[in-house]
């Protein structure tokens, strides 16, 4: 059974992607900081016929992330798909004149370094298996800086650059590296099936040949 690890598995997009991939036959490793919430989500998914388990980790603490991914692989099998989508703290959405070096460092740890640790933990198994998917989910500040959202404006581009380089480096190995950019708040996008449409889009972009970056909607139509 293929396994997806969702880093940032909350009640919104994380749960929707877990359901979509679960229905497609994936086992799901749910990763976020709160074990009790992960366990409750895993119970919900299991009731719907999806194999799911929760593994607590904080992306700002690499050892916890690496341990969660290792435990998930031991229990569920090698991770074939990695989604990196932790929800940024409101602290990373402060105006630029409030951005301290400490906050910038934390935002970079959250977005870029966490992803680099996670990728290095799962990539050997993907390469050995001869394929896999790595999916980054980001807001519009990954493409265009906004002075009101300073932390993500500094950190998302670093995450994106790493993803884009991975895309180039792994293209020949059947490891599909993809980024979905969601400009603006998901509820405000008024998608016909809400968050499920975003999960479907993620499923589609990682299943087919295509570019590194996909915009869910054009940047000028969104915010963030
Ligand atoms: N929601 C939007 O409107 C929107 C707009 C644009 C882009 N996005 C992107 O969509 C993704 C999030 O989707 P969502 O908003 O629907 O969220 P979600 O999947 O409902 O939840 C994401 C989860 O990330 C976890 N998280 C936060 N900080 C973490 C940390 N330090 N370490 C590990 N996990 C952490 C939180 O759980 P814990 O608190 O238990 O750790 C949270 O429940 C992100 O990639 C975000 O950039 C969302």
Image (tube, rainbow, N blue to C red):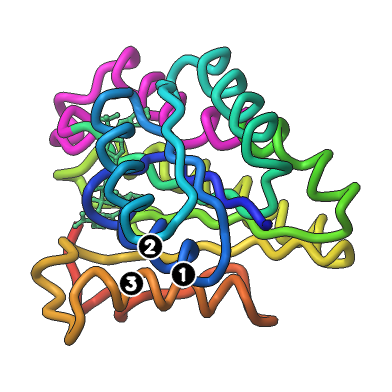
Q: Please name whichever residue, 31 or 107, is drawn nearer the observer in this view of the structure.
A: 31
The C terminus sits in image quarter: bottom left
- Determine whether 12 is above or below 148 in the image: below
The N terminus sits in image quarter: bottom right
Q: Which residue is mark 1?
A: 23
Q: Please name whichever residue, 149 or 21, is drawn nearer the observer in this view of the structure.
A: 21
Residue 92 visible at all: yes
Are there few (<14), some (14-19), or many (20+) residues within 10 Å of tag 2? many
Q: Earlier in the sequence, mark 1 or mark 3?
A: 1
Q: Quadrant of ligand 1?
A: top left
Q: Which residue is mark 2?
A: 19
Q: Which residue is mark 3?
A: 198
Q: Classify mark 1 as within 8 Å of ligand 1 or not, answering yes or no.
A: no
Where residue 203 appears, as percent x and y from the top left, is 50, 73
- CB under 8 Å between discs 2 and 1: yes
Report, in whole angstroms, how far the alpha carbon at label 1 lies from the one at label 3: 15 Å
* Residue 155: mark in rendering: none
Residues rendered magenta in the picture: 90-117
* Residue lying at 59% horizontally and 18% vertically, measured from the top left: 67
Nearer to us: label 1 or label 3: 1
Report, in whole angstroms, how far the alpha carbon at label 2 lies from the one at label 1: 6 Å
Q: Please name whichever residue, 1 or 60, is drawn nearer the observer in this view of the structure.
A: 1
Task: Identify the element where label 2 is drawn.
Answer: helix
- In the rendered image, residue 41 lying in the magenta stretch gets the answer no
Where residue 97 appears, as percent x and y from the top left, is 16, 28
């Amino acid at each position: 059974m293929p396994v997806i690890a969702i880093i940032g598995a909350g009640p919104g997009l994380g749960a929707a992607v877990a359901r979509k991939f679960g229905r497609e036959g994936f086992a799901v490793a749910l990763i976020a900081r709160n074990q009790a919430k992960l366990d409750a989500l895993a119970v919900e998914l299991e009731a719907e016929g999806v194999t799911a388990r929760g593994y607590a980790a904080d992306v700002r603490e690499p050892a916890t992330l690496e341990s969660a991914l290792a435990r998930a692989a031991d229990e569920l099998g090698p991770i074939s798909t990695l989604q990196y989508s932790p929800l940024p703290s409101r602290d990373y959405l402060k105006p630029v004149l409030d951005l301290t070096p400490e906050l910038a460092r934390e935002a970079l740890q959250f977005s870029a370094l966490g992803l680099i640790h996670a990728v290095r933990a799962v990539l050997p198994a993907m390469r050995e298996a001869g394929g896999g998917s790595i999916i980054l989910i980001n807001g519009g500040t990954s493409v265009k800086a906004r002075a009101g959202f300073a932390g993500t404006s500094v950190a998302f581009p670093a995450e994106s650059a790493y993803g884009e380089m991975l895309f180039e480096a792994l293209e020949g190995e059947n490891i599909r590296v993809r980024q979905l950019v969601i400009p603006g708040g998901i509820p405000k996008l008024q998608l016909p099936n809400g968050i499920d449409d975003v999960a479907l889009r993620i499923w589609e972009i990682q299943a087919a040949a295509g570019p590194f970056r996909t915009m869910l909607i054009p940047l000028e139509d969104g915010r963030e």
